[in-house]
Image (cartoon, rainbow, N blue to C red):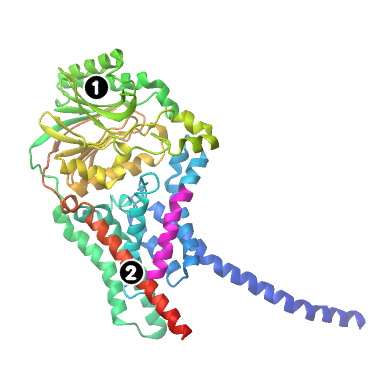
């Protein structure tokens, strides 16, 4: 009996201790749901980006993000925004660590995700306002605007617009550039969540405010209708005649950072592919091009200082018999430039364009002494900083005006627009992706060029050292492309255009307008919060 009584007593004492513990763990698991949802919705957004064509996944990604943030306090929203940023940017930018290891990749993501964290706090703040999807989408674009400018002149990679090259929203790029395109996608995603939320609310309570329902439906519908209407701005007809262009991909001896040690081989490969093309033209197998485009770093040996390099380029130009745009590394007055050189088959070099938006930690080293003290490998890899160019680059090649946008510059709105406003009838984006092996980077950058083609209604060519090189029509279609790490050439007759889209004419104004909308929404939310607190104290 004693044993039984003791057993029963122990059982009575243990039960109250176990139940609260189980409830505590249950509460903790419930708290983890928003965090997991934020990270997973960020991952879903990444999956919507190239090389996949699942652009529509951006909508449920932002719908879940809206659900996670709506009504949250700013501290929780900061953390949830950071998790969303990590879920999105960690896989999106993994290519940055292909050759230099995980340290720089993780550091870059950690910094860039801070911008998304601040956006998360902003979205949570405006989520309590009437018409919140509009304010929230504008806050996202304000975050992209900040990320495109700081630190170290910004890093726009991962703009929502760059994931929409295959999507129905793409024509909006011609209306207001990447800010308007991105705003439409984010607005539609938040609108999707609002429609679902109100549908659930109506099922539970039988009541929904008409104004809220109208905002949700309009947020979902207006971007789609606007994109359909904007299709009238997209076309590929020639306005100033046409030009037959040749894009040369010479390939590199091997992928990775050490391809630079094979500079002469890279130059020889591009010259050899140009000679091969010249032979095919002579045999009547391929149409004679009006001009030829080589990629960035196709001649890392300075042809102004090295007679051998000059002779190689001269020989290729004479063989093909038309002007070539050569990507070179040039030292002038003690300064290093990433330069495009217009090479005439009879006169040699006749014009140049120096890259203006140079890449931090790749073409120059910010805080050199500080970084060197932490990691000497950086200073070894970037021994001398490149200098920035100051003028737009538009080459006149056999009568056609070709705007040059070198590699990293394609991510920045202002660099591309400046070439078009300076008279470019088509755009070339010479690039060197050999450093990043077979990663998704080349496909992400190719998608940027497709968006730029529609934004400014221009043919865009993408000559790349190791692939993927491509020819893109003004409507964003890829008509030809190469494989990766093969020597190849593309020849095609392309339209030349001089009209300007609304996006080209408006420039930065749509982005400024959306930033002001975001500021207005945040100001309203903060003011409402302060008034509510003051009324509560009274």
Magenta stretch in the rendered image: 109-126
Residue 363 pos. (x, y %):
38, 34
Depicted 357 relative to depicted 18: above or below:
above
Q: Which mark is residue 521?
A: 2
Depicted 383 relative to depicted 222: above or below:
above
Describe the element under mark 1 as helix, strand or loop: helix
Residue depicted at 14% across the width and 53% down the height: 233
Q: Is residue 372 left or right of residue 532?
A: right
Q: Are marks 2 and 1 in contact (CB under 8 Å)?
A: no
- Mark 1: few/some/many CA within 10 Å (<14, 14-19, 20+): many
Q: Main secondary structure of the magenta part?
A: helix
Residue 329 pos. (x, y %):
32, 26
Q: Is residue 123 magenta?
A: yes
Residue position marked by numbered label 1 in the rendering: 274
Residue depicted at 28% across the width and 55% down the height: 179
Q: Is residue 110 magenta?
A: yes
Could one spot residue 504 in this view of the protein? yes
Residue depicted at 24% across the width and 66% down the height: 222
């Amino acid at each position: 009996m004693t044993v039984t009584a003791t057993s029963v007593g122990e059982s009575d004492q243990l039960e109250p201790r176990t139940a609260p513990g189980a409830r505590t763990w249950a509460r903790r698991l419930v708290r983890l749901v928003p965090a997991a949802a934020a990270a997973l919705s960020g991952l879903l957004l990444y999956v919507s980006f190239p090389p996949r064509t699942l652009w529509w996944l951006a909508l449920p990604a932002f719908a879940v993000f809206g659900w996670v943030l709506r009504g949250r306090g700013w501290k929780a929203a900061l953390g949830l925004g950071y998790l969303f940023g990590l879920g999105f940017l960690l896989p999106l930018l993994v290519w940055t660590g292909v050759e230099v290891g995980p340290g720089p990749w993780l550091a870059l993501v950690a910094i860039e995700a801070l911008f998304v964290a601040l956006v998360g706090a902003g979205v949570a703040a405006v989520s309590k306002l009437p018409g919140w999807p509009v304010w929230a989408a504008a806050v996202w674009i304000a975050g992209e605007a900040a990320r495109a400018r700081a630190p170290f002149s910004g890093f726009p990679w991962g703009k929502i617009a760059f994931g929409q090259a295959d999507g129905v929203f793409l024509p909006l790029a011609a209306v207001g550039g990447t800010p308007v395109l991105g705003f439409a996608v984010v607005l539609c995603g938040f609108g999707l969540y609002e429609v679902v939320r109100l549908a659930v609310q109506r099922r539970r309570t039988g009541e929904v405010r008409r104004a809220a329902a109208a905002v949700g439906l309009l947020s979902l519908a207006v971007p789609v209708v606007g994109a359909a209407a904007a299709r009238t701005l997209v076309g590929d007809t020639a306005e100033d005649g046409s030009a037959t262009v040749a894009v040369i991909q010479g390939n590199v001896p091997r992928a990775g950072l050490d391809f630079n040690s094979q500079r002469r081989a890279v130059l020889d490969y591009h010259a050899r592919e140009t000679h091969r093309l010249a032979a095919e033209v002579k045999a009547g197998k391929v149409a004679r091009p009006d001009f030829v485009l080589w990629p960035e770093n196709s001649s890392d040996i300075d042809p102004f200082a090295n007679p051998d390099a000059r002779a190689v380029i001269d020989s290729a130009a004479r063989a093909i018999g038309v002007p070539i745009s050569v990507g070179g590394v040039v030292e002038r007055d003690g300064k290093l430039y990433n330069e495009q050189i217009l090479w005439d088959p009879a006169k040699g070099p006749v014009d140049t364009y120096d890259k203006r938006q140079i890449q931090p930690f790749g073409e120059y080293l910010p805080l050199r002494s500080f970084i060197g003290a932490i990691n000497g490998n950086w200073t070894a890899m970037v021994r001398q900083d490149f200098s920035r160019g100051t003028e737009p680059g538009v080459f006149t090649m056999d009568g056609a005006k070709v705007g040059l946008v070198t590699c990293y510059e394609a991510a920045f709105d202002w660099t591309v627009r400046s070439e078009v406003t300076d008279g470019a009838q088509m755009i070339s984006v010479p690039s060197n992706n050999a450093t990043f092996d077979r990663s998704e980077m080349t496909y992400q950058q190719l998608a940027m060029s497709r968006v730029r083609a529609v934004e400014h209604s221009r043919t865009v060519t993408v000559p790349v050292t190791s692939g993927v090189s491509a020819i893109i029509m003004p409507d964003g279609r890829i008509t030809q492309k190469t494989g990766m790490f093969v020597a190849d050439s593309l020849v095609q007759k392309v339209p030349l255009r001089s009209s300007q889209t609304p996006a080209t004419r408006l420039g930065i104004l749509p982005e400024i307008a959306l930033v002001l909308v975001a500021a207005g929404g945040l100001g309203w939310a903060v003011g409402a919060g302060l008034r509510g607190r003051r009324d509560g104290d009274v």
